[in-house]
Amino acid sequence: MSAYYAASRLWVDAIIDPLDTRKWISMGIEMANHAPIEKQFNVGIIQT
């Protein structure tokens, strides 16, 4: 499947140029750092 096909159907928000990957990842980390923590993360019971 092509990324352009998925974008034309609005299945993805954007197509990221591989040269801009670091910029997008750093923006995501920065946004996550400023997001409030609403409740404590709980993984529950992990059964192995």
Image (cartoon, rainbow, N blue to C red):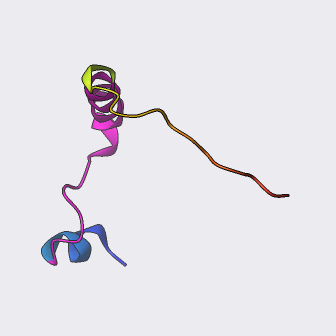
Relative height, residue 29 to residue 47 (above, below): above
- In the image, residue 5 lies at what x, y percent? 23, 77
User: Which of the 4 image quadrants contains residue 23?
Assistant: top left
Residue at x 33% of width, y 32% of height: 38
Relative height, residue 43 to residue 27 (above, below): below
Q: Is residue 9 left or right of residue 47?
A: left
Q: Quadrant of the N terminus?
A: bottom left
- Seen from the viewer's position, the closer of residues 45 and 2 is 45
Q: Is residue 47 left or right of residue 36?
A: right
Relative height, residue 30 to residue 14 (above, below): above
Looking at the image, which residue sits at the far right? 48
User: Which of the 4 image quadrants contains residue 39?
Assistant: top left
Residue at x 27% of width, y 27% of height: 35
- Seen from the viewer's position, the closer of residues 42 and 29 is 42
- In the image, residue 34 lies at what x, y percent? 26, 20
Q: Quadrant of the C terminus?
A: bottom right
Question: What secondary structure characterizes most of the magenta part?
Answer: helix
Q: What's the magenta region?
A: 9-32
Say if the magenta span includes residue 26.
Answer: yes
Residue at x 25% of width, y 74% of height: 6
Say if the magenta span includes residue 46.
Answer: no
User: Which of the 4 image quadrants contains residue 22?
Assistant: top left
- In the image, residue 29 lies at what x, y percent? 35, 27
- Seen from the viewer's position, the closer of residues 21 and 36 is 36
Report how many numbered discs are placed on residues in the image: 0
